[in-house]
Image (spheres, rainbow, N blue to C red):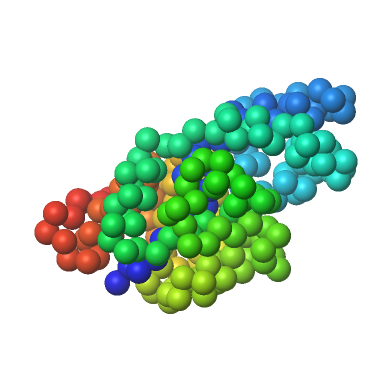
């Protein structure tokens, strides 16, 4: 029986790709770095910020992150948009007493969750600074299940990256790959997804089906 759902944040609950692109290009313009395309930024969303900047620009400087936090973080939040199915899904899961949490490779993810007005839904919001190792290690998911007091067999995890699916496999939970990110169905399945969805609202069909609800939707 499903008792909890854990979510990645970027490109799973929200479309943050354009906000992150603008934020990274804000750094690029200030530091004389190469301006990035949206497609390039999509390819690194989900990585810890230090790793993503090193991959895309060839190096990482702590001063860049400090400047970003001081001068652009709030503007980034303004550019993030919820997927249309996010709030209805969270409302439905909350009404069913399904425990929910966020497990993201974003730093200070609690601030992002709060900025989007989602804090009332989540019993935990874990970022890279809250665990020993970021995804693809299972640390975040294991800690989330501990806080929600559920077992792997009672938990679903939604994410859009290879690291998300690898973390789900390592934690022993069913990983639902979201094609709203940079990977398609086949790539997510290859990465370990138990199932894939193109719309987050499809999660309710999975939950209802497992609970034996006669109104459950067909999920493929």
Q: Is residue 112 above or below residue 205?
A: above
Q: Quadrant of residue 53?
A: top right
Q: Is residue 12 above or below residue 170?
A: above
Instruction: Report if residue 190 is visible in the image.
Output: no
Lateral position of residue 12 relative to residue 126, left or right: left
Residue at left 70%, top 60%? 129
Instruction: Report if residue 15 is visible in the image.
Output: yes
Position in image of residue 59 (x %, y %): 85, 42
Location of the N terminus by quadrant is bottom left
Position in image of residue 130 (x %, y %): 67, 63
Position in image of residue 44 (x %, y %): 65, 41
Lateral position of residue 102 relative to residue 200, left or right: right
Residue at left 49%, top 33%? 81
Q: Quadrant of residue 27?
A: top right
Q: Using the image as rendered, state which of residue 79 and residue 152 is in the foreground.
A: 79
Residue at left 74%, top 26%? 25
């Amino acid at each position: 029986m499903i008792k909890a759902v854990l979510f990645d944040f970027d490109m799973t609950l929200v479309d943050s790709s354009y906000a992150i692109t603008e934020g990274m290009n804000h750094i690029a313009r200030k530091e004389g770095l190469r301006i990035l395309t949206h497609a390039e930024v999509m390819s690194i969303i989900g990585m810890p910020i230090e790793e993503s900047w090193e991959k895309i620009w060839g190096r990482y400087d702590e001063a860049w992150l400090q400047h970003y936090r001081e001068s652009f973080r709030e503007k980034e939040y303004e550019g993030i948009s919820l997927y249309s199915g996010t709030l209805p899904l969270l409302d439905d899961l909350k009404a069913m007493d399904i425990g929910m949490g966020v497990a993201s490779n974003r730093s200070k993810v609690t601030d992002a969750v709060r900025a989007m007005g989602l804090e009332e839904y989540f019993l935990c919001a874990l970022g890279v600074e809250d665990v020993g190792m970021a995804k693809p290690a299972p640390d975040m998911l294991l800690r989330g299940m501990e806080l929600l007091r559920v077992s792997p067999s009672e938990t679903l995890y939604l994410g859009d990256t290879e690291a998300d699916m690898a973390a789900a496999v390592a934690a022993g939970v069913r990983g639902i790959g979201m094609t709203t990110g940079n990977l398609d169905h086949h790539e997510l399945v290859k990465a370990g997804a138990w199932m894939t969805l193109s719309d987050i609202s499809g999660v309710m069909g999975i939950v209802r089906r497992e609970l034996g609800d006669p109104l459950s939707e067909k999920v493929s």
